[in-house]
Amino acid sequence: MKTSRLAGAAVLLAVGLLMIAPLVWLVTQSLTPEAQAFTLPPRWIPSPWSTAAYHEIPGLVPFGRMALNSLEVAVLSTVGSLLVSVLAGYAFSRLEFRGRNAVFMVMLSALMVPVQMTVIPVFILMRTFHLVDQLPSLWLPALVNVFSIFFFRQYFASIPRDLDEAARLDGAGHLWILFRMIVPLSGPAVAAMTILTFETAWNNYFGPLIFLSSPEHMTLPVGLVTLQTGQTGSAVVVLAAITAVVVPVLLVFLLFQRSFAASIASAGLRG
């Protein structure tokens, strides 16, 4: 039994090292002087350390402005999507109204529609409201996240309704029950959707490419492509920019990883 556990731990360690190796290589190469980068075998510890590539980025693209744009889009998309999804998930799991199941099934059918098929009507809608080439054209459509609504609906449905009945006997309303009782009990689910929504909004390339045209409104994914296709930025500078884009998402994951793992582990235990 002990031998099998050690073997399993060794396999997991090996797989983990293989998965983290590209990230480590990315960071180390971005801190390696250009003359010593991309050597074979690769250097996992740069010697000497150099941050020159990071200092070159602002001179090639407006990295700071793009970072603020990406942060605005990611934060507003995440907060707004969580609020809408929590409210909709509570309605579909707790409220009884005519056509609830039919509306829910129609909404789920939207998961089978590729984003590329909806971009034209969304673009026309944004143009009607004069939001093309504006950041709201990215985070407003992200407020309605069908998968997030479905996720919260299933999670809320697993919470015993006896808690609702006890709260109603004390005079609590739906909003009190949702935000003071249901949401605190759904911490792992909220953390999981926070990670997924933030990552999706932060790494979104297709939306900014379609809706944005002004350089001052560009986000980081578009800026990375501009930096990569330009003739002024070296490969080390591109790796440094990629590292600067990856780090915020990694920090968000590390911040919520325990709750995210708890939500995944409890998924098979909930009805």
Image (cartoon, grey):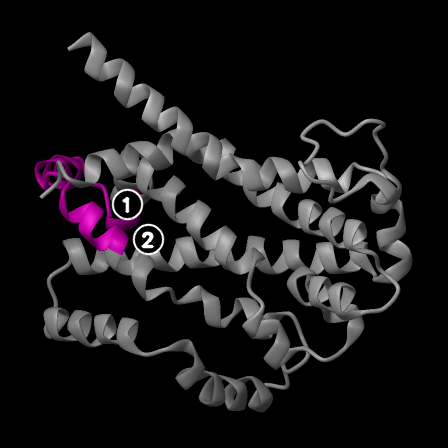
Residue type at mark 1 is Leu
| Residue at numbered disc 2 | 86
Span highlighted in magenta in the image: 151-176
Q: In which quarter of the image is residue 49?
A: top right
Residue at 83% x, 56% y: name it.
Answer: 234
Residue 117, image x, y percentages: 40, 85
Q: Residue at x 19, y 60 (%)?
A: 92
Q: What element carries label 2?
A: helix
Residue 44: give its label.
none
Residue positioned 44% across, 81% down in the render = 116
Q: Distance between the residues labelled 2 and 1?
A: 8 Å
Whole-percent x, y for residue 213 in the image = 72, 80
* Quarter-of-image position of residue 58: bottom right
Q: Are marks 2 and 1 in contact (CB under 8 Å)?
A: yes
Q: Can residue 40 be seen in this view?
A: yes
Q: Where is residue 170 in the image (x, y as percent from the top left)?
A: 17, 35
Indicate which label's residue lies in the foreground, 2 or 1: 2
Q: Quadrant of the N terminus?
A: top left
What is the quadrant of the C terminus in the image? top left
Q: Mark 1 points at which residue?
A: 178
Q: In this view, does 262 lie above or below 144?
A: above
Is residue 169 covered in magenta? yes
> Majority secondary structure of the magenta segment?
helix
Relative to residue 243, is residue 58 drawn left or right? right
Q: Which is nearer the eye, 91 or 33?
A: 33
